[in-house]
Amino acid sequence: MPSAKEQTAQALRQYAAPTAVVALVASAIAVLMWLTGGFARANPNHGLVTDVTIFVGLIGFAIFTACLVIIDFAHHLLPHIIMIPATIWVLLVMLLVWVTGGDGDAVLWGLMAGLAVGLVLFGLALLPHAGLGGGDVKLAALLTAVVGWLNPPALFGALMVAVFGSGVFALTLMMSNRATAASAVPLGPFLVAGAWIGLALGLL
């Protein structure tokens, strides 16, 4: 059986175009957030350096999450080779935003929200037949930290999108006889979609 690294490389080669499309859509949300003042919660003073830091951070985040969406759909895998750099990237961007004049309370709120969600989901993952993997738990915590940092009022909506989207996807597969109630459903893509929709809600 191919290693996680080999499966990751294979998926990104095979689905390079869809990965690029997902990354571009997420990047477009980042652009619109910047243009419409969507960084205000993290950067209430509207410092240019801080805004640029957030923007660059979101572009990198868009690329990481696009890769995770495709890999999870292809192999039901959220590999450490992507998750660890993505986590380091987010933490580094948060630190730089704080140092360059961003709202430290917003950073702490995002981190605490991510930690809380991660702990709750970790507990749920220990239950029999929970259907949650370690990768799902870590990704949910990371995404919660970002949404909780930039647009905390959208956290509940982001979660609902993930739960509803994954449920509809699973139901569609079962109705088309392509899966059963016991089949594994990739949760990562719906967590990512919920997070980016949550960030986009800040544009309203």
Image (cartoon, rainbow, N blue to C red):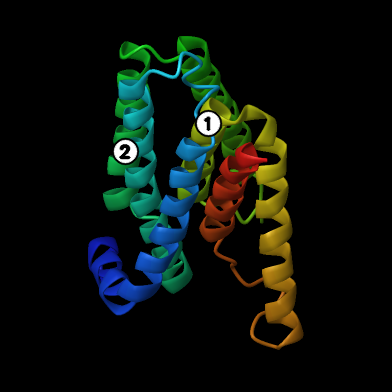
Q: Which kind of residue does numbered mark 1 sit on?
A: Gly
Q: Would you place residue 130 above or below residue 153 in this image?
A: below
Q: Residue at x 52, y 26 (%)?
A: 149
In this orientation, which residue lies closer to the viewer: 47 or 131?
47
Q: Which kind of residue does numbered mark 2 sit on?
A: Val
Q: Nearer the viewer, mark 1 or mark 2?
A: 1
Q: Where is residue 12 drawn, in percent x and y?
A: 29, 69
Q: Residue at x 69, y 71 (%)?
A: 170
Q: Could you say which quadrant of the image residue 38 lies in?
A: top right
Q: Where is residue 173 drawn, in percent x and y?
A: 68, 79
Number of numbered callouts drawn: 2
Residue 126 appears in view: no
Say which residue label 2 marks.
56
Q: Where, quadrant-wise, is the C terminus in this rendering?
A: top right
Q: Residue at x 34, y 23 (%)?
A: 48
Local packing at callout 1 (Cα closer than 10 Å; few below 14, some 14-19, many 20+) is some
Closer to the chain start, of discs 1 and 2, is: 1
Residue 83 appears in view: yes
In this orientation, which residue lies closer to the viewer: 162 or 119?
162
Q: Would you place residue 165 above or below residue 32 in this image?
A: below
User: Distance between the Cα atoms at labels 1 and 2?
Assistant: 15 Å
- Contact? badges 1 and 2 (CB < 8 Å): no
Say which residue label 1 marks.
37
